[in-house]
Image (tube, coloured by chain):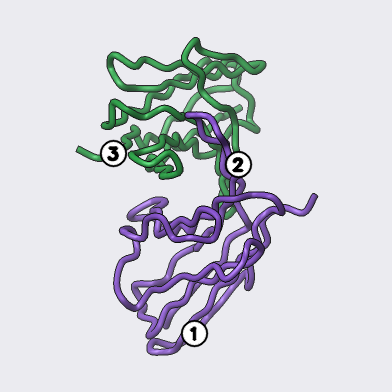
Chain colours: A purple, B green
Amino acid sequence: DAGVIQSPRHEVTEMGQEVTLRCKPISGHNSLFWYRQTMMRGLELLIYFNNNVPIDDSGMPEDRFSAKMPNASFSTLKIQPSEPRDSAVYFCASSPETDSAYNSPLHFGNGTRLTVT
Amino acid sequence: RKEVEQDPGPFNVPEGATVAFNCTYSNSASQSFFWYRQDCRKEPKLLMSVYSSGNEDGRFTAQLNRASQYISLLIRDSKLSDSATYLCVVNIGYIDDMRFGAGTRLTVKP
């Protein structure tokens, strides 16, 4: 089985440009998560979806950030306009549905390393 | 108080040593707990789930203390290859709301 697939692996862009990060979750997984990782703040949950519906976007730092999940096999995280402080590694993760009180673990993609100059 | 807290370390230990990490969490209603391992410039990978009764996987033992709201990870007979950052993960609020600790960096030296 293919794991979580993210693209691009690396993105270098200039301040003010639009950036779109893409994620394909593992087939059959119902929950999808976007995390951002920096040295200073560690792994931060930005937003997560369940069955393509955004459940909690309280971690999205600003209106410049938006995320969509148009179908079960694709999600995007968009930053417009980008700023140097957005430089980080962005991870997408997915997990299968559970009907119990306990979560299934997260499966991470390789991440997108974003540099905004 | 942060939702999930870990001692960032670093922990520098010799090969063969036993090392333990703790992770505290703030939400007494949390039900799901995991330990992840992250190597430099790589994605986090599941190391093990943490069950109420405690569980063991080879040299690794995970425990949950609900009364004091912490989980622990014990590594016995540490290997050079155990050098990594260890992240604890706890669900906060909604069942799918998974939050990571800042990670504990471990270096095992020959």
x and y percent of residue A87 in the render?
Answer: 42, 71
Residue at 39% over, 51% down: A42
Taking B96 as reference, is A105 left or right? right
Residue at 36% over, 15% down: B65
Name the quadrant containing residue B70: top left
B49 up-or-down from B16: above or below: below
Give the letter of the chain under mark 3.
B
Name the quadrant containing residue A99: top right
Write down the residue under mark 3: B3
Q: How many marks?
A: 3
| Separation of marks 2 and 3 at Cα, in angstroms | 21 Å
Residue type (three-letter) at the residue carrying disc 2 = Lys
Local crowd at mark 1 within 10 Å, few (<14), some, or many (≥20)? some
Q: Nearer the viewer, mark 2 or mark 3?
A: 3
* N-terminal label among 2 and 3: 3
Local crowd at mark 2 within 10 Å, few (<14), some, or many (≥20)? some
**Element type where label 1 sits in the image:** strand
Extreme residue toward the right, this view: A1
Quarter of the picture containing the C terminus of chain A is bottom left
* Viewer-side residue, A6 vs A32: A32
Taking B107 as reference, is B81 left or right? right
Write down the residue under mark 1: A13
Write down the residue under mark 2: B45
**Element type where label 3 sits in the image:** loop
